[in-house]
Image: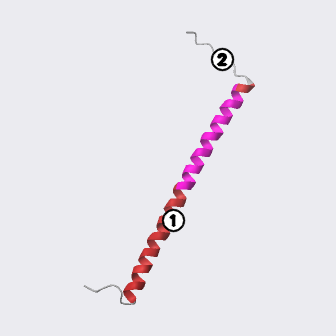
Amino acid sequence: MQNQPRVLTEHDIDEIAEKAAEKALEKVYTEVGKSVVKKALWVIGVGCIALFIWLAGNGHVPKT
């Protein structure tokens, strides 16, 4: 096998660019998804704590 440099055609460059763009978009969507899930879990957690405090304040949670 020879180690001669290969000349890229316009088609080759377009394919490489398209693949790179797809991978970049995939990474962006993954990060956005992680961020949305993390924020949703925070909201659910705060809601659960608020509900517990409200129930405790109204006497629905037995004291130990």
Residue 22 location in percent, x, y?
A: 63, 40
Say which residue appears at 69% left-offset and 22% top-offset. 8
Residue 14 location in percent, x, y?
A: 71, 31
Mark 1 secondary-structure assignment: helix
Q: Tell me which label, 2 or 1, sits earlier in the chain.
A: 2
The image's mark for residue 40 is: 1
Check the image and name the residue furthest to the front. Answer: 60
Front-most of residues 57 and 31: 57
29 left or right, relative to 14: left
Q: Quadrant of the N terminus?
A: top right
User: Would you place residue 49 above or below residue 15 in this image?
Assistant: below
Mark 2 secondary-structure assignment: loop
Of the residues shown, which amino acid type is indicated by label 1?
Answer: Ala
Check the image and name the residue furthest to the left. Answer: 64
Residue annotated with mark 2: 6
Q: Is residue 28 covered in magenta?
A: yes
53 left or right, relative to 1: left
Among the 4 quarters of the image, the one containing residue 23: top right
Q: Quadrant of the C terminus?
A: bottom left
Scheme of colours in the image: secondary structure
Among the 4 quarters of the image, the one containing residue 9: top right
Front-most of residues 24 and 63: 63
Of the residues shown, which amino acid type is indicated by label 2?
Answer: Arg
Say which residue appears at 57% left-offset and 46% top-offset. 27
Q: Is residue 21 covered in magenta?
A: yes
* Residue interval drawn in magenta: 12-33
Among the 4 quarters of the image, the one containing residue 33: bottom right
Residue 19 location in percent, x, y?
A: 64, 35
Say which residue appears at 68% left-offset and 30% top-offset. 15
The image's mark for residue 29 is: none
